[in-house]
Image (cartoon, rainbow, N blue to C red):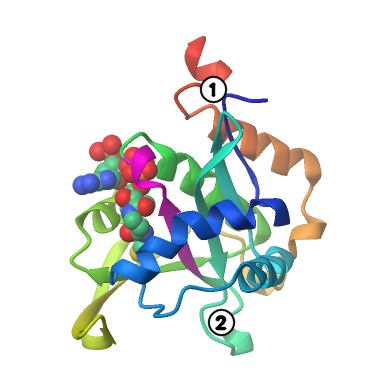
Amino acid sequence: MKNAEIRLAEVEDARSILEIYAPYVANTAVTLTSKVPTLEQVVQTMLDIKKHYPYLVCTRQGEVVGFAYAYKLRPHEAYRWNADLAIYIDPRFQGKGVATALYTALFQILKIQGFCNLYAVITIPNDASVALHHHFGFKELAIMKKSGFKLGAWHDDLYMELKIPGCCDPGTFGAPLPMNLLNKNELATTLAMSTALLDGSPQKVGQ
Ligand SMILES: CC(C)(COP(=O)(O)OP(=O)(O)OC[C@H]1O[C@@H](n2cnc3c(N)ncnc32)[C@H](O)[C@@H]1OP(=O)(O)O)[C@@H](O)C(=O)NCCC(=O)NCCS
């Protein structure tokens, strides 16, 4: 078993993903989802997302400690080069570079696929998430004031945007590649390089 790893999510990870996600849904406005999904819904969402977008987990000693994925922003064909983002880290493992490693892999895979614009919609205040997205070069676009009502209160949403530097020209390369057409070696190299960012990875330990 690897000490620490960034890898593609599998159906078997769904229970751990739900365990990380459920408290954020039930007790906070970090996500404006109001009802904790069932295990079956987490699996189905994962299977749908995995066809077109990367869905990643970070493991430590084989345990899933965080996950991140991209998904469709809006249904229109013209928005195919855009993606919305989700990232959740187990509170016991926050502040240790897990999100950094997950996002590094996620954004590189999205770039290889041919995506151009990434969006994070953050219920504010959420200093950690806003700082994380600034850290990766996202710019603040707009605040939708009192746009979500959850847990008895209105909440504001901050939209943040990253234009992926050097993304492929859609006019030349067409729509983003589905996940199953990605070059396997390139994918493996991207995941290995992100794993190397984690404390406890063989590369980081041996630096
Ligand atoms: C936001 C979140 C994903 C960050 O994950 P993490 O693994 O703790 O982040 P990292 O350790 O990789 O930190 C990366 C950068 O994010 C910023 N950051 C992370 N946590 C922070 C905090 N508590 N306060 C301020 N900045 C923070 C820093 O810029 C940090 O870089 P630095 O260490 O060089 O200063 C995590 O706090 C989390 O899961 N929060 C709850 C769920 C959530 O808010 N998801 C996003 C919904 S929009």
184 and 93: which one is in front? 93
Which quadrant of the view contains residue 159? bottom left
Q: The residue tagged with tag 1: helix, strand or loop?
A: loop
Q: Which residue is mark 2?
A: 79
Whether residue 30 is situated above or below residue 167 in the rendered picture:
below
Where residue 194 sits: x, y (%)?
Answer: 54, 35
What are the residue bounds of the magenta stretch? 84-94
Give residue 105's quadrant in the image: top right
Asked if labels 1 and 2 touch by Cβ distance under 8 angstroms, the answer is no
Write the residue at 59% across / 90% down: 76
Identify the amino acid type marked 1.
Answer: Ser
Going from N to C along the chain, the mark reached first, 2 or 1, is 2
For disc 1, the marked residue is: 201
The residue at 58%/72% (across/down) is 38
Three-letter amino acid code at disc 2? Tyr
Is the N terminus in the top left, top right, bottom left or bottom right quadrant?
A: top right
